[in-house]
């Protein structure tokens, strides 16, 4: 071999970490990035009982994390950051199923902080949500989390205090199985997707309160109408009468965001190495604060093998929309091609980030053009017109009463009769008249692409569902908003109004129906549990901790309430949660009062839902 080829070499752990650090150092990007996230990494190694200094991969039974102030720059933008051990993303925690870990988190900030272990099943008082499960970590204090690792998979961690998650406090977690890993490959990479803005999220919120479409620079205009693009004049007028914008896809966009892979923008071209003939496992985490990504590697099929850390029966596809807070594991087989573009495109097409999977450093796959931005439809307003008489020329006049074929269906956009449990008020501008199950739908903007796109309905758990019981009751939870005023809530009530918790009895089986009454997707996350999406026949339904509820749609999941305690339940779009789309779920033993545990009520202002 005439020169060193890291992709072709065996990758024992110590050499792999040293190689990644050396390559990164040669590029001059060692600064804020942990070694595992630097460009040119050969991959990550399995858990070790000892952490390796400088690797950015922390293992073992005792781990120390230090949260502090930093500065971060990418793509010509720079600003204040909150980091862990001085890096962004935070160190990779690679641990093993069956062990117990103690993680001491020291706060050097001037404000309270916290860490939530996203997707890990931990005792509720170790879940890390101030005001719900613990008081938070005050400035100068150290809090030691201690919990057993009861399952394996790909997860992540982030702050649950204020807006710290949006300014850098997030990192990956990989839990290796206690025994042999049936998904083991020759090489693994972790890809943390994120969004970054020099405008502080509190300022983003202020601007959105002033003008809900402040960051949307892709609205329909007269030139587009004259060119025959997007909606017809009649549709535009009808949507205008309803004060709806069919291009209102994302609140905060590429206007202010830089999109990142492992902290790198497109120009910085994060590169992960491979050797021909290898099977490469990609552990992809969407750690964004407000961006759902369309993830694809043009020319390379993605074999989906795990979702939210849980193994699924392999599904081959070409593109996956990864909602905020979701994780997917893919296996790819690059073959003899020298490099591939890894593309994460923002849902609204306002921007994207390109990274590279390559046989050696220095290769840069082409950056694909950003595709045309989507335009919402009646289906996204909860008006599914399929199978109905739409009136003359297949169009519906929303200014007139419904025709006979719509008997029994309200066509009003704010009819309380369709959602009797919702508290009506200025925070509820719309209610979906006819929400439909959209688990088999392609996600927003990918309806018409000419290749395969993963839908939730294609996912089947690899292992049988642990609880085959039929739910004994069901509840409806409406995701509500007044988007014009940038007000977000559940069942018409913001978290700042201190609503009663959603009560469950320990061990009971409940069906939860999520109804999206807004025109935006909402990635809904339940702490402390996995739930089963009601998709396909029972037995191997996909188990997840986060589900993206499409606009105007509904999702049902079955839950076994086996995590005793208080848990957060919220939209993982950070500004939506902060504005109020959040609840507390309580799981109590029979005979125990449903009130939340004492000592938490005094801290509600810190949980990130204080602005109704």
Image (tube, rainbow, N blue to C red):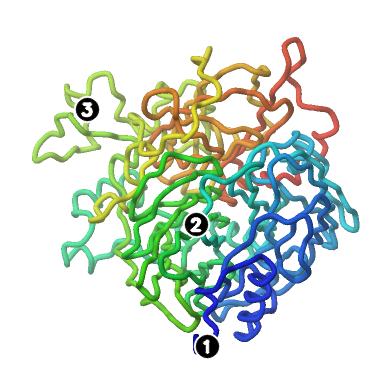
Q: Nearer the viewer, residue 593 or 321?
A: 321
Q: Are marks 2 and 3 in contact (CB under 8 Å)?
A: no
* Quarter of the figure with residue 384: top left
Q: CA distance from mark 1 to mark 3?
A: 73 Å
Label 2 CA crowd tier, 10 Å (few <14, some 14–19, many 20+): many
The disc at residue 401 is none
Kindly identify the residue that appears in the image at 50 percent across and 24 percent down. 476
Q: Secondary structure at mark 1?
A: loop
Mark 2 or mark 3, whichever is nearer to me: 2
In the image, residue 34 lies at what x, y percent? Answer: 68, 69
Kindly identify the residue that appears in the image at 65 percent across and 81 percent down. 22
Q: Nearer the viewer, residue 295 or 607?
A: 295
Q: Is residue 337 left or right of residue 596?
A: left
Kindly identify the residue that appears in the image at 34 percent across and 57 percent down. 301
**Label 2, on which residue?**
281
Q: Is residue 176 left or right of residue 597?
A: left
Q: Is residue 358 visible?
A: yes
Q: Are marks 2 and 1 in contact (CB under 8 Å)?
A: no
**Label 1, on which residue?**
3
Q: Is residue 191 visible?
A: no
**Label 3, on which residue?**
402
For marks 2 and 3, the one nearer the N-term is 2
In the image, residue 493 lies at what x, y percent? Answer: 59, 33
In the image, residue 503 lies at what x, y percent? Answer: 65, 21
For marks 1 and 3, the one nearer the N-term is 1
Mark 1 or mark 3, whichever is nearer to me: 1
């Amino acid at each position: 071999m005439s020169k060193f080829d890291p992709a072709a070499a065996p990758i024992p752990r110590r050499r792999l970490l040293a190689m990644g650090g050396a390559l990164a150092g040669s590029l001059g990007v060692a600064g804020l990035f942990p070694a595992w996230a630097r460009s040119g990494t050969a991959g990550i190694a399995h858990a070790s009982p000892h952490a390796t200094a400088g690797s950015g991969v922390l293992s073992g039974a005792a781990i120390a994390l230090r949260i502090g102030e930093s500065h971060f720059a990418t793509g010509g933008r720079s600003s204040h950051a909150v980091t862990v051990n001085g890096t962004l993303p935070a160190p990779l925690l690679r641990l093993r199923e069956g062990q117990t870990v103690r993680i001491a988190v020291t706060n050097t900030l001037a404000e309270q902080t916290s860490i939530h272990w996203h997707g890990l099943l931990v005792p509720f008082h170790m879940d890390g949500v101030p005001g719900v499960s613990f008081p938070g970590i005050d400035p100068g204090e150290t809090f030691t989390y201690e919990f057993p690792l009861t399952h394996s998979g790909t997860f992540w961690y982030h702050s649950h205090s204020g807006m710290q998650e949006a300014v850098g406090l997030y990192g990956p977690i990989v839990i290796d199985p206690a025994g042999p890993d049936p998904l083991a490959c020759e090489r693994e990479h972790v890809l943390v997707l994120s969004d970054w803005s020099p405008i502080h999220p509190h300022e983003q919120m202020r601007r959105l309160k002033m003008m809900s479409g402040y960051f949307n620079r892709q609205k329909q205009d007269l030139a587009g109408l004259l060119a025959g693009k997007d909606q017809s004049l009649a549709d535009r007028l009808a949507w205008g009468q309803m004060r709806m914008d069919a291009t209102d896809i994302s609140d905060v966009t590429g206007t202010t965001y830089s999109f990142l892979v492992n902290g790198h923008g497109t120009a910085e071209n994060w590169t992960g190495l491979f050797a021909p003939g290898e099977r490469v496992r990609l552990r992809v985490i969407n750690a964004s604060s407000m961006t759902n990504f369309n993830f694809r590697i043009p020319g390379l099929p993605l074999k989906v093998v795990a979702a939210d850390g849980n193994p699924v029966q392999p599904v081959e596809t070409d593109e996956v929309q990864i909602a905020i807070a979701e994780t997917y594991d893919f296996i790819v087989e690059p073959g003899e091609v020298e490099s591939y573009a890894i593309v994460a495109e923002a849902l609204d097409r306002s921007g994207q980030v390109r990274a590279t999977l390559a046989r050696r450093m220095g290769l840069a796959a082409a950056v694909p053009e950003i595709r045309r931005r989507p335009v919402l439809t009646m289906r996204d307003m909860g008006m599914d017109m399929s199978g109905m008489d739409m009136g003359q020329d297949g169009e519906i006049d929303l200014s007139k009463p419904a025709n006979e074929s719509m008997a029994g269906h309200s066509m009003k956009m704010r009819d309380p009769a369709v959602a009797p449990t919702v508290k009506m008020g200025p925070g509820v501008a719309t209610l979906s008249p006819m929400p439909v199950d959209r688990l088999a739908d392609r996600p927003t903007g990918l309806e018409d692409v000419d290749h395969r796109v993963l839908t939730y309905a294609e996912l089947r758990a690899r292992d049988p569902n642990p609880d085959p019981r039929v739910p004994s009751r069901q509840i409806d939870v409406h995701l509500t908003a007044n988007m014009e005023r940038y007000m977000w809530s559940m069942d018409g009530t913001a978290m700042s109004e201190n609503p009663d918790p959603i009560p469950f009895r320990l061990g009971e089986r409940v069906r939860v129906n999520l109804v999206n009454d807004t025109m935006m997707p909402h990635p809904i996350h339940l702490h402390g549990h996995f739930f089963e999406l009601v998709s396909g026949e029972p037995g191997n339904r996909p188990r997840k901790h986060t589900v993206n509820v499409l606009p105007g749609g509904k999702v049902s999941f079955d839950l076994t309430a086996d995590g005793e305690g208080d848990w957060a339940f919220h939209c993982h779009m950070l500004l939506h949660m902060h504005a109020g789309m959040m609840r507390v779920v309580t799981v109590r033993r029979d005979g125990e009062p449903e009130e939340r545990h004492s000592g938490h009520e005094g801290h509600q202002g810190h949980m990130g839902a204080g602005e109704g």
